[in-house]
Image: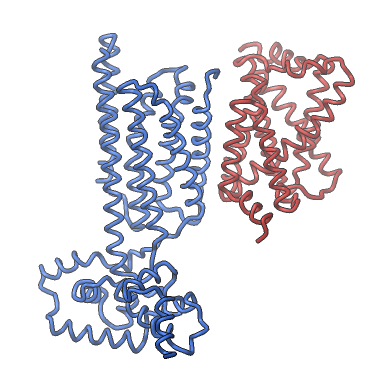
Chain colours: A red, B blue
């Protein structure tokens, strides 16, 4: 056994995976951002150790058009379920989502484009890779690869994902955690194709960031709160 | 959550890790044994106790009483650990109504807490001295309980060892090591926590604050160790349908209904047994058990157990291993086997681990196998 194979065995052992998820969770609760970056470092290291076997994380070649259409459908679903129904209700109880961290892109086209680019790499690709391809999939397999195991794994990774967005306030934690549940379900439906999740995440974030750029990010939430949930 | 410290971070880490492992144990398909559930309960209770800071933070919004009630659950941890050890040693053990007696300390503290709460509501305030007095009693019950259960667990282990060596010829050191280490680690953990409680709470030695870190790191080590061992899942060994109860019980039973055999009958059986062992060499099979040997020799398991474990006054384990050592001594000095390593020979004669072979060999001959072989070959040469 070479050193690299030994490292691969260690990095893919259930104990290491459980510990990595726990450390990432604690870092997220305490610092909000470092948890995700810690996760990135670990999965890149794991990927190197297993000789760049991307299918370990559910990434492989897939028909593009079908994948793209699927993700458009899922994006629409998330917008309807989360932005129209879930988020307005949560914000009524826990206050507005805190998006001040993204204030800089409002009306600034260059920052907007740069941010979209960073988002595709870090959020769409990176986060799906870490939270779905690594955490959800690995935990589900450790727990026995049954439907129940997947459900629990999706819930756990969504909680960690929610806490990784702590800078958005309590509402932010809850709504991102909720959206993560949908991403998890999407991944469960397409276990061999993480690209569906990546594209869904990317398109959904492009939608959200564009709304912020146009200074219209409150438009759906406010309209829904005033016209549908006015009785609360 | 502003005042989070490093201590809280380690607590959260240990708690979350334990939570993941408990889910793994509850979901595990291969061995859905009751002992898994008990260790999962033990881990969860310990993890909850460690996470009290976060629990208070969550529950105190509604009522302080919720977290107080939940904290009493720690009185179920020691029984859970004990039942885990007992059921993992004796896998056929069925829970009885009697086992609900294990919840008595928990119920006792629950009643006390409820009456204190009623007192608080009716009289407005519980005097500090009363509160302190009950606090001391609570801690005393907790630590007495854990040491008592650790002692009971240790006794179960010893009892099991006796039955095991009277019925089996292969060693089981891995499993015993796990349980011994578990008992030891939990004893260390609770001793440290006791020091922590005494210095900080009872005497207010603030300079001992570092002990909290020692305690929480011990918890983390315990969890990591349990996860690593648990994921490797050492298999269970005693087949209850085959193993005979300890020979002391058998002899007592035999005396009461005078079914014990006479001396001469026993000597006849011993001769038959020794002849069978020499001619057929059943000991070459590493998995030989008392039950199997009884079937081969047409002696009932019960009689055979009394014959070997009581009449010859040797454990079945030692009885069989002596034959194995004799055979090994023969092979070690046999010129035909000159090129065989000691490892190859020990597997050939029916041992399944190097350490148990070395121990047994040294006990029997006073020499290590390699020393013995060197001496013997020297003699042959001269």
Task: Indicate whether B53 appears above or below A51.
Answer: above
Q: Residue furthest front?
A: B382
The quadrant in which the N terminus of chain B is found is top right
Task: Indicate whether A75 appears above or below B372.
Answer: above
Image quadrant where residue A114 sits: top right
Q: Nearer the viewer, residue A77 or B292?
A: B292
* Residue B294 image position (x, y, % from top left): 30, 78
Number of numbered discs present? Answer: 0
Q: Nearer the viewer, residue B218 or A92?
A: B218
Instruction: Write the residue at 83% across / 39% down.
Output: A69
The quadrant in which the C terminus of chain B is found is bottom left
* Residue B186 image position (x, y, % from top left): 37, 43
In the rendered structure, the answer to whether residue B347 lies left or right of residue A119 reads left
In the rendered structure, the answer to whether residue B173 lies left or right of residue B104 reads right
Q: Residue furthest top?
A: B124
Instruction: Write the residue at 33% across / 31% down.
Output: B195
In the rendered structure, the answer to whether residue A206 lies left or right of residue A10 reads right
Image quadrant where residue B207 sits: top left
* Residue A57 image position (x, y, % from top left): 71, 47
Q: Nearer the viewer, residue A162 or B365?
A: B365
* Residue B200 image position (x, y, % from top left): 35, 24
Task: Indicate whether B2 appears above or below B18.
Answer: above
Image quadrant where residue B203 sits: top left
């Amino acid at each position: 056994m070479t050193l690299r194979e030994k490292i691969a065995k260690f990095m893919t052992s259930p104990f290491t995976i459980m510990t990595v998820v726990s450390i990432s969770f604690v870092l997220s609760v305490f610092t909000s951002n470092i948890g995700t970056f810690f996760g990135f470092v670990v999965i890149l290291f794991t990927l190197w150790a297993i000789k760049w076997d991307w299918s370990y994380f559910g990434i492989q070649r897939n028909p593009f058009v079908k994948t793209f259409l699927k993700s458009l459908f899922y994006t629409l679903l998330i917008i309807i379920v989360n932005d129209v129904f879930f988020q307005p209700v949560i914000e009524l109880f826990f206050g507005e989502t805190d998006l001040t961290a993204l204030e800089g892109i409002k009306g600034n086209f260059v920052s907007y484009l740069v941010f979209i680019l960073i988002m595709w790499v870090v959020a769409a690709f990176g986060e799906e890779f870490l939270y779905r391809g690594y955490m959800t999939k690995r935990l589900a397999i450790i727990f026995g690869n049954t439907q129940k195991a997947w459900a629990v794994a999706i819930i756990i990774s969504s909680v960690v994902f929610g806490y990784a967005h702590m800078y958005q306030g309590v509402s932010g934690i809850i709504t991102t955690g909720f959206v993560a549940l949908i991403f998890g379900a999407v991944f469960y439906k397409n276990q061999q194709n993480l690209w569906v999740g990546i594209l869904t995440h990317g398109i959904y974030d492009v939608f959200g960031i564009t709304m912020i750029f146009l200074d219209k990010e409150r438009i759906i939430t406010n309209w829904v709160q005033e016209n549908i949930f006015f009785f609360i | 959550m502003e005042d989070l410290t490093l201590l809280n971070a380690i607590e959260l880490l240990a708690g979350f890790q334990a939570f993941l492992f408990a889910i793994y144990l509850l979901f595990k398909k291969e061995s859905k044994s009751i002992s898994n559930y008990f260790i999962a309960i033990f881990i969860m209770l310990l993890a909850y106790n460690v996470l009290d800071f976060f629990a208070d933070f969550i529950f105190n919004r509604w009522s302080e009483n919720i977290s107080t009630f939940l904290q009493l659950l720690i009185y179920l941890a020691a029984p859970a650990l004990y039942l885990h050890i007992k059921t993992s040693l004796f896998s056929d053990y069925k829970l009885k109504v009697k086992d609900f007696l294990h919840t008595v300390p928990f119920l006792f503290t629950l009643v006390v807490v409820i009456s204190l709460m009623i007192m608080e509501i009716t009289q407005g305030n519980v005097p500090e001295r009363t509160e302190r007095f009950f606090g001391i009693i609570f801690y005393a019950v907790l630590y007495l309980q854990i040491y008592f259960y650790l002692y009971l667990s240790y006794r179960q282990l010893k009892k099991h060892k006796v039955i095991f060596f009277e019925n089996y010829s292969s060693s089981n050191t891995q499993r015993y090591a796990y349980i011994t280490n578990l008992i030891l680690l939990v004893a260390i953990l609770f001793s440290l926590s006791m020091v922590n409680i005494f210095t900080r709470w009872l005497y207010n030695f603030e300079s001992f604050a570092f002990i909290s870190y020692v305690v929480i790191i011990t918890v983390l080590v315990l969890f990591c160790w349990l996860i690593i061992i648990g994921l490797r899942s050492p298999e269970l060994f005693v087949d209850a349908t085959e193993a005979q109860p300890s020979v002391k019980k058998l002899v007592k039973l035999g005396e009461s209904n005078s079914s014990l055999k006479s001396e001469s009958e026993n000597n006849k059986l011993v001769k038959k047994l020794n002849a069978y062992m020499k001619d057929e060499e059943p000991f070459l099979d590493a998995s030989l058990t008392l039950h199997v040997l009884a079937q081969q020799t047409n002696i009932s398991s019960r009689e055979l157990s009394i014959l070997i474990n009581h009449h010859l006054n040797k454990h079945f384990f030692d009885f069989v291993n002596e034959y194995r050592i004799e055979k090994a001594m023969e092979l070690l000095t046999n010129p035909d086997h000159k090129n065989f390593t000691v490892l190859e020979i020990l597997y050939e004669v029916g041992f399944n681990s190097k350490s148990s072979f070395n121990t047994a060999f040294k006990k029997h001959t006073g020499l290590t196998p390699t020393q013995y072989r060197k001496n013997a070959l020297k003699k042959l040469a001269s």
